[in-house]
Amino acid sequence: ALTWCLIMFFMMPYWHIYGKQNLSNEAYQTTPAKFGAKVQEGIDQNKVGEEAGLPIIHPPAGSDVYMLARLWQWWPILELEKNKTYRLHLSSMDWQHGFSVQPININMQVVPGYEMVLTVTPDQAGEYGVVCNEYCGIGHHTMVGKIYVKE
């Protein structure tokens, strides 16, 4: 058991660096009102359309992109460019949510009062589903969002 514990202990840094299992990110304290204002500003500046009543935004490459979680919705829909880098800011307006991008393996916790920031560079065009993977109430199963990656 000791040998196995030591193996697992030394594999953790390896998985973090080479396995892309744990994203390096930044976190800042915020309030739902402040973060909501940032999201709305991004929508006002970068809106390109709507889908099912949700705004679709196409931010410029290299910019800060804001997406919020609230019962039971990821808002807004993002339209990003392939091989361009973005700083994705995430926060929750109400409960703890899980940010999971499918079919790639991005998972992180999104909690109220904190703005999580991660740097993303999509390398494949397509439609990606954003799923909440933390139970957040009766409508949890409907909490899905989208990220489009264009050529």
Image (cartoon, rainbow, N blue to C red):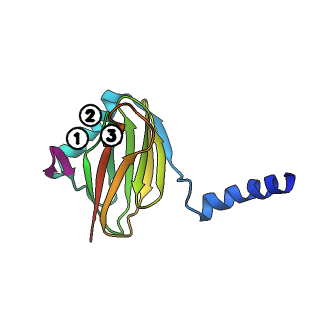
Q: Residue 86 location, x and y as percent?
A: 36, 57
Query: Which numbered marker is on residue 41?
Result: 1
Give left or right: position of 79 versus 93.
left
| Region rendered in magenta | 49-56
Q: Which of 52 and 92 is in front in this view?
A: 52
Mark 1 vs mark 3, CA separation in Å = 13 Å
Query: What residue lies at 43% left-to-right and 36% top-to-bottom?
Result: 135
Q: In this view, does 125 lie above or below 20?
A: below
Mark 1 vs mark 2, CA separation in Å = 6 Å
Disc 1 to disc 2: CB gap under 8 Å:
yes
Q: What element carries label 2?
A: helix
Q: Nearer the viewer, mark 1 or mark 3?
A: 3
Q: How crowded is mark 1: few (under 14 residues within 10 Å), some or many (20 or more)?
A: few
Query: Which image quadrant for residue 119?
Result: bottom left
Q: Which of marks 3 and 2 is nearer the N terminus?
A: 2
Q: Residues within 10 Å of mark 2 (few under 14, many from 20)?
A: few
Disc 1 to disc 3: CB gap under 8 Å:
no
Q: Is residue 124 above or below residue 140?
A: below
Query: Which numbered marker is on residue 68?
Result: 3
Q: Is mark 3 on a helix, strand or loop?
A: strand
Number of disc labels? 3
Q: Residue 60 location, x and y as percent?
A: 26, 58
Mark 3 vs mark 2, CA separation in Å = 11 Å
Q: Is mark 1 on a helix, strand or loop?
A: helix
Amino acid on which disc 2 is placed: Ala
Amino acid on which disc 1 is placed: Glu
Label 2 sits on residue: 37
Query: What residue lies at 32% left-to-right and 30% top-to-bottom?
Result: 34
